[in-house]
Image: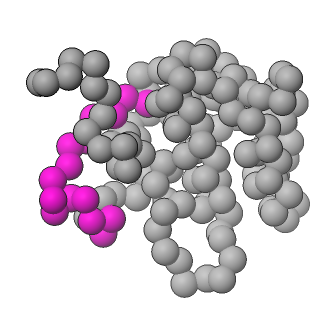
């Protein structure tokens, strides 16, 4: 390996390199990039749907589904952890913007509870057991 400090193969596909095998969102190891890519696998049609990537897929509807909006939150969380490691934080606007688009339902109330975790406009990700438990089904 030329650069031993390298953390990913291709910056464009970092979310597609994440596995979705656990829902311990407070653990740094949840965000380990481990999928490999080739010229064939770079095509989005050959990549599996995960909570990290659902937002990237086309849908026939004109408005985003709830699942797709929630995927955008998980993308923001993952990108923050990939960039910032243990000090990852997410701006509360990420959660507020999605919450404001949802109809009154369980997901909207969960997002309201997540917003209560705010500290100075941000929510810490790693070692935040409350956030992790709220993000789990």
The percent coordinates of residue 42 (x first, y second) are 25, 59
- Nearer the observer, 83 or 34: 83
- Nearer the observer, 30 or 104: 30
Instruction: Tell me the quarter of the picture where residue 44 sits.
Output: bottom left
Question: Which residue is depicted at the point 28% across and 26% down?
Answer: 6
Q: Is residue 16 above or below residue 132?
A: below
The percent coordinates of residue 8 (x first, y second) are 30, 34
Instruction: Tell me the quarter of the picture where residue 64 sits.
Output: bottom right
Q: Is residue 119 above or below residue 134?
A: above
The percent coordinates of residue 125 (x first, y second) are 63, 25
Question: Which residue is depicted at the point 37% across and 29% down?
Answer: 32
Taking 5 as reference, is 63 left or right? right
Taking 1 as reference, is 30 left or right? right
**Residue that protrudes farthest toward the front in the picture:** 2
Q: Is residue 79 magenta?
A: no
The boundaries of the magenta stretch are 31-45
Residue 104 at least partly seen: yes
Question: Which residue is depicted at the point 54% across and 23% down?
Answer: 84
């Amino acid at each position: 390996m030329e650069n031993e400090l390298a953390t990913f193969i291709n910056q464009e596909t970092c979310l597609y390199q994440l596995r979705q095998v656990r829902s311990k969102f407070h653990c740094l190891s949840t965000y380990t990039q481990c999928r490999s890519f080739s010229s064939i696998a770079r095509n989005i049609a050959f990549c599996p749907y995960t909570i990290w990537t659902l937002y990237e897929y086309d849908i026939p509807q004109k408005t985003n589904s709830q699942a797709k909006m929630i995927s955008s939150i998980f993308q923001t969380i993952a990108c923050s952890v990939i960039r910032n490691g243990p000090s990852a934080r997410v701006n509360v606007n990420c959660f507020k913007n999605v919450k404001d688009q949802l109809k009154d339902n369980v997901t909207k109330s969960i997002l309201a509870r997540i917003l209560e975790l705010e500290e100075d406009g941000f929510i810490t990700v790693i070692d935040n057991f409350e956030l992790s438990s709220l993000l789990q089904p």
